[in-house]
Image (spheres, rainbow, N blue to C red):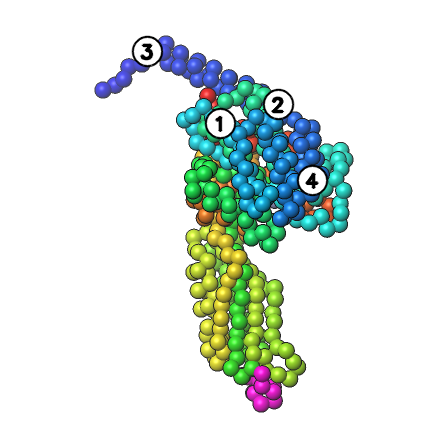
Amino acid sequence: MVEVVDPRSRIHMALVALNQDRSNQMKIDQVIDQISGSWIAEETLQLVRVPSVTLHEQQVCQLYEQQLLALGLEVQVREVTPGRNNLYARLSGTGGGPTLMLNGHLDTIPNQNQQPVYQEGDLLYGRGTTDMKGGMAAILAAVRGLQLANVRLQGDLLLTAVVGHEEPEAKKDGPLAMIEDLNQGRISCDRILIVEGPDALWIMSMGSMVFTIALESERGGTHTQYVPFGDNPLRFLGETLARFDTFQQELDQGLVHPLAGPERIDLGIVQAGDYFNRIPQTCKLTGTRRWAPGRQAETVLEELRALIDPIARKGGLRANVSMEHQREPFETPGDDPLVEAVATAHRQVTATEAEVVGKRIVGDANLYVHGSGVPTIYYGPSNETAHADIENVSIQRLQSAARVYALAAMEYCGVQ
Ligand SMILES: [Zn+2]
């Protein structure tokens, strides 16, 4: 049956759609107008003035909680260790839309060279400005912009701040506590946007592990003159290094990830021997292996074992291959609704297309995706001076990022 549509009703529908577009555009313009760099700069400076090296975040947690409460948000304080709290704040939606979490960390690396906190022109200086108190202030501005423009989201918007991200001593206790809370249903969300990194869509990271290969010799502790040089385990160290070399060439020619490039095997520490004329008992090689999405740490470790076993056998050595600090890779598809929402918001704010990037380095997204199953991406104001001696962030870019966060929330959560 052919449906007959009255041409007048078609015109009416087109007009309704046009009006909808106009009112959407008006809302977008109002939100953009309500987000100003100077407000973000003020909040960022307040946060940066309170030092918060990992494991010493107590004071900055209190300050950020105050900043969240000042926006009228409901704040859940989640103690990780005494006084060190994850903060979960909610901007409740009207219902019917998905929940978006904007996430970041409140701790910093140490301020090694005592760099002062100050503003000069468009730049805010000090430890933690770009990594990542600027981003944490930008998400406050995004919420404030939505509120001042009277935009009611359909889905909830969660703002979460974790402790324990930077220094290895904390063992990622803040991010892991949040994963536990997601898994226990104490908080829930459909997507996580981590507000750090470059102002690009960072949608994948390789997996990473620190591996150690220990080649052990039965003849260790013997005078070198009683063992033929060809049997000395150090000779097989040479062979192992050469094998790494060809292995990297194989990786370069293997499956090269379009965003992150070829996989890597890298070496940082070689240890062997305790005296110039004693056969070493153990040769140890410690390095990093980074691999593309699609395989898990265990498989990659097996591959390393297969690489080393023939060499060890030849030398009558025992090979022990182990890993630590392993993180599985993550990759969120380019057509994921959150990726599309941030891409749209970036276009609305900057009139340019957001670059889509992948990285070999791992971060909290690897943990969140594998620990909680929630698809996660990054989009930050900037990260060029993260961990640098002179750290700074551009107010202009904070403003732009905050606008992107607000518009992405409208796009993803829906607007009433
Ligand atoms: Zn960071």
Q: Which amino acid does label 2 sit on?
A: Gln
The residue under label 2 is 34
Q: Distance between the residues labelled 2 and 4?
A: 27 Å
Q: Which amino acid does label 3 sit on?
A: Asp
Q: What segment is highlighted magenta in the picture?
A: 221-231
The residue under label 1 is 92
The residue under label 3 is 6
Q: Where is residue 339 in the image (x, y as percent from the top left)?
A: 49, 37
Residue sitting nearer the eye, 380 or 200:
380
Q: Which amino acid does label 1 sit on?
A: Ser
Q: Position of residue 403 (x, y in %)?
A: 59, 29
Label 3: few (<14), some or many (≥20) within 10 Å? Answer: few
Q: Which amino acid does label 4 sit on?
A: Val
Q: Quadrant of residue 155?
A: top left
Residue sitting nearer the eye, 125 or 122:
125
Q: Distance between the residues labelled 1 and 2?
A: 20 Å
Mark 1 vs 4, N-terminal side: 4
Secondary structure category for the residue under label 2: helix
- Residue 224 among magenta residues: yes
